[in-house]
Amino acid sequence: MHRSGFILLIQLLIIVSIQCQLQGNYDINEVFAQVIEQLQWNNETNNVSVNFVNVIRELQPENIITVNAKRDFNRTLQQWIVNDTKCDTQFSIFVNGLTTSELWALKMLDSSSKIPSGNLIGNMKDLGFYDECVSVEVTREDEFIRGRHCMYSLSVRVPNTTVSLRHTMSICLPAACDSEHVDQIVQQAMDTASNYHDFELELKSARCSSVDPAPWEIGDIIAISIVTIFAGFLILCTICDILLGVNGSSLFKHNIFKELSKFSLYTNGKRVLDTTVPQGTLPAIQGIRFFSMCWVILGHEYVILPMGAVINMVNIGEWISSWRALYILIAPFSVDTFFVVSGFLTSYLFLKEISRGRKFNVIMYYVHRYIRLTPALGALLLLTIYVFPRIGSGALWESNVVSQKHLCSKNWWPMLLYVHNYVNTDYMWCLPHTWYLAVDMQLFWISPLILYPMAKKPKLGMAILLAFVIASVITPAVVAAENKFSGALFMFSNLRKFQDAMTYFYVTSYTRAGPWLLGVILGYVLSKKQIPPVRKFMYCGWILTILMFAFTFFTYRVFQTPEYEWNAPWEVFYAAFARHIWAFSICWIIYASVLGYGGALSKLLSLPIFIPFGRISYSIYLVHFIILTMKIGNIRTPKYFSDFQQLYLFSGDFVICTFGGFIFSLFFESPFMVLEKFFLVRNIRTKTMG
């Protein structure tokens, strides 16, 4: 496999795996090493592959249990027990149960890992059978024994070479044993194994799933009570709305019922699903949102897969070096599309309101934005910390979903202030996709510095805007050059370098502002009275747009070539202009569509069916990543990677994410929009812009 394929796969895994490795017994560096070792193995170890399989066979759960059963034959306390006789006692009962072929003991052994096929193409993580293990509950010799699902990772290295591989397997043990005991019994088997003299063995990690549900804490009770009460209130408002519509009694026509009905799930649901095109709707915007959101979810569908278990991991490396991977590797441009749309709407709507005589109230301008975005984000944090960890289980549930609870419980306040891309960056992997919200909000904070001068003194405003645009070109180029960051993001074979690139280059407002600023320019242009453009000008614009899209697609192949090394001139150019080039193309589609020169593309993007989706796109964006994370945490068997499988999974996940976003919008977005209108009605009547 090409070197670049190794590197790209490494970072594809790390971008989403870091978040769940920050929890106590997970090591980021181990995950990083596991990926690169696994890929290198397939290229360098044909001559030792048979011996490797023998090593893994020697250290599979059945043999580990056998080794420790022999040492525990007389049920005497052994050194590996770590001063815990209860685990020793239950383990001995378990071994006796195997000897007498008791069904419960056979289930525990049966649910543990066996040597899987496909080791040499990357089938290196076996999950065992989680549910069979935890279903064991028996009482033997006055001991209540339950199954506990545990996993351990072994590193196998050929002496005097760089060839190394990591294999993860599961073992079902009595619940009295924990990860420390797993560490000891596996180490005991390693010490007595006889078939690995040609290898260096190391136990990298051992972990066990929780046996009992997490205890209820005050925060859990308060959070679930709040969600329940709020949901009950909305259901009550829905009942009032229905009664108001079908009951002619004057009682239900009282003002209080009319006000409550505004929070109705039924009324808000009809409003969201209404496909009537409102007067003054800008063409193409909702369609651009729809396809960009599809691209975001599809990209995360690929990225999140290695957080689970994949039986052909090496094939991912081969795929990622091919042309077939380009549409996923350039998926980060979909986020730049959202920045363009955000900047365009912010500018266009602001300047239109000012032109109609509305006064600018800077406080209400910021309050409106904060109220518009924050309740839904706060609700997602509340659910992620207190609710979602309790609604599932699995071998990978704690390392994916429960780890989100721990990360978010330490990072909730920077997230609610939209500064988590700069503050507490060690915990930024709590709902990692929300970095976009932070950058977008920070750009919104500075928007009055540009928009107000543009409205009052256009020449001054345009000068300020152009200065920002120039800075948005120079800044990422300088940052990339100084730190040797790659505009392709995935080109770092060093973990620390990748983390630095994410923290100081990928999720920072000063390196992502370019597309947003071009959107602001577009909003300014279209807010003015338009003179019909010359047809040749429009033709040239479309040709240039096609060439720019082609540039962003085909130039990524440069990073995929096996001989590619970090090249200063190319990296600086790419960091400076790639996002602007993509953003210009999106701006042109909007510009041409608004002026009526968008043709069939504009008609497609302006279809009324996209209007409901546009209304819930924010909620879909919020919930989609945690839905995918819970799906991975809940898997029971390894998955096979292929483009067909990923597109198949995407089709179902997209429907689920859309439905989840719709429900989330009804409960946590629409009600607060109603509240905002209620409390700010006086400001609206006095024509104070917010």
Image: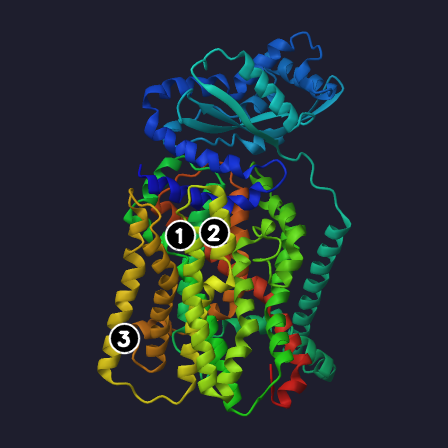
Decide if residue 100 is in sight here. Answer: no
Please tell me which residue is depicted at 67% across the width and 58% down the height of the picture.
413
For the point 39% across and 47% down, which residue is it?
491
Q: Earlier in the sequence, mark 3 or mark 1?
A: 1
> In the rendered image, is residue 213 in sight?
yes
Q: Which residue is labeled 3 in the image?
A: 541
User: Residue, x 33% and y 30% (percent of image)?
Assistant: 43
Q: Which residue is mark 2?
A: 501
**Depth-wise, is mark 2 or mark 3 nearer the camera?**
2
Residue 67 in the image: state x and y as whole percent.
57, 13
* Label 2 with label 1: CB-CB less than 8 Å: yes
Q: Earlier in the sequence, mark 2 or mark 3?
A: 2
Report, in whole angstroms, how far the alpha carbon at label 2 lies from the one at label 1: 8 Å
Tell me which amino acid carries mark 3.
Gly
Crowding near pointer 1: few (<14 within 10 Å), some, many (20+)? many
In the figure, residue 586 lies in which quadrant?
bottom left
Residue designated by label 1: 486
Q: Element under label 2?
A: helix
Residue furthest to the top: 74
Q: Amino acid at mark 2?
A: Ala
The residue lying toward the viewer, choosing from 681 and 552, is 552
Q: Quadrant of the N terminus?
A: top left
Q: Residues within 10 Å of mark 2 (few under 14, many from 20)?
A: many
Q: Position of residue 108 (x, y in %)?
A: 59, 24
Out of 390 and 167, give the one closest to the viewer.
167
Camera-side residue: 337 or 616? 337
Asked if the residue under mark 3 is in contact with the one under mark 2, i.e. CB atoms within 8 Å, the reply is: no
- Left or right: where 403 falls relative to 225: left
In what element is the residue under mark 1? loop
Residue 362 falls in image quadrant: bottom right
Does the residue at mark 3 contact the one at mark 1 (Cβ under 8 Å)? Answer: no
| Numbered label attached to residue 530 | none
